[in-house]
Image: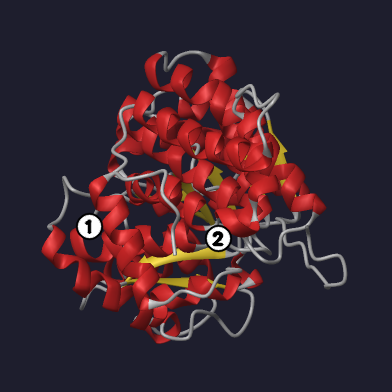
Amino acid sequence: MFPMLKVVEYYTPQQVVFGVNAVDNLGSYIKNKGITGKAIIVTDPGVAQAGIADRVVQALKKEGFDTAVFDQGKPEPDNVVCDQAVEFARKEGGKFVVGLGGGSAIDIAKVVAQLLVLPGKTEDYLVKTTFPQKGAPIVAIPTTSGTGTECTMYSVVTFAKDGIKGFFATPYILPDLALVDPTLTVSMPPKVTASTGADALAHAVETMMAKQENPVTDALALKAVEFIGEALPVAVYEGNNLEARVKMAYASMMAGMAFNDPGIVEGHALAHTLGSVYHVPHGVGCAVALPYVMEYNMGHCMEKLARIAAALGQNISGMNIRQAAQAAVYAVKQLLEDVGLPTTWAPFGKKEDIPKLADMMVESPWITAFYGWCKRKMTREAAVELLTRSYEGRLGEKLY
């Protein structure tokens, strides 16, 4: 049951533009918002080499905008690469920022937009998870279908000094314009399509299990689950299928909108733990964690899980509520395996590391922050159990 008596808040970008080839009219959308000056495009080498950055540059130049491209973004960005992008943007005299790429490039761009206005370096603000005011205008253009960061008030940045994943969480970094053009995702390789799709699925499912879920976020999340179940395998194995890319782009965007207020739960806590210790790519970590976290939360969200099972095409007619909920767990696990993702972290780490990982899951403030959105209390015993199950690939038993 959603929290009928609680106050909920909805954070979304000022404007969202979604459509095939919409990027080619980027300049006019920005001009109509009254944004002026030089654009700093933050992207990564792969997006630049694919010619996508050139397409964006041309769309901006068509409307008279001057541009400069920082193309040295990297996956799982840290404060060092953010500072490099900030230095570039300041030297170029940028007035607004275009984040172009996967979640990592857009997360860097969110920081750059703030530090075009504010003094100092990324770590000065990262330790507080926020900024004191709104920065320069930011436009977010995803080239993957996963993080939904084009529609969120979050930016994940790793502390370079110790490898721990931190994050910003503030409405100040919500994009002024999110432009989602599914044609930009067609060149995504199969492995990236799969892992980013797993991230979107985790956002949708975890949102529905969070304590601040509500009818609006449930509706967005459930439709995202349905689209991912239909389209993710097609997008992975038939990458030029535009219908599948459109559905995945919608799913990623809707899941991002959904979790802005309710947040995401234990699956991301486990994924961030694996990412911090083993540098497991974020989407892969989400894939590993998701089925076990669904089962972990079975006791308080059977009805939600049953709806997820139906959205994933499971025939739950004649099942009791627990059977239907368990069907969702197995359906998610099968979907992830169908697109070539691991559902155990055994390939990345050692079982004897579990005590150390459990300590991180209950002691690190960058991990425990997720539990503020959870309905269940996380204990060290529960962390050990989750880590053990997800290492062994063991489902179907009651989780205490």
Describe residue 28's horizontal placement relative to residue 353 as left or right: right
Rendering coords of residue 120 (x, y %):
40, 85
Nearest the viewer among 28 and 331 is 331
Q: Which x, y percent locates residue 190?
A: 34, 25
CA–CA distance in space, label 1 to label 2: 20 Å
Q: Amino acid at mark 1?
A: His
Q: Residue 96, located in which quarter of the rendered image?
A: bottom right
Q: In the image shown, does 161 or 375 lie closer to the viewer?
A: 375
Residue at image position (62%, 44%) is 305
When the figure is inspected, residue 65 is found, relative to residue 338, above or below; the finding is below
Label 1 vs 2, first from the N-terminus: 2
**Dot 2 lies on which element?**
loop
Asked whether residue 63 is in view, the answer is: no
Q: SS of the residue at dot 1?
A: loop
Q: How many marks?
A: 2
> Could you say which disc has been placed on residue 84 in the image?
none
Amino acid type at circle 2 is: Ile
Residue that numbered label 1 is attached to: 279
Instruction: Give the residue drawn at x 29%, y 72%.
Output: 358
Who is closer to the viewer here, 172 or 194? Answer: 194
The quarter of the picture where the N terminus appears is bottom right
Residue 264 numbered mark, or none: 2
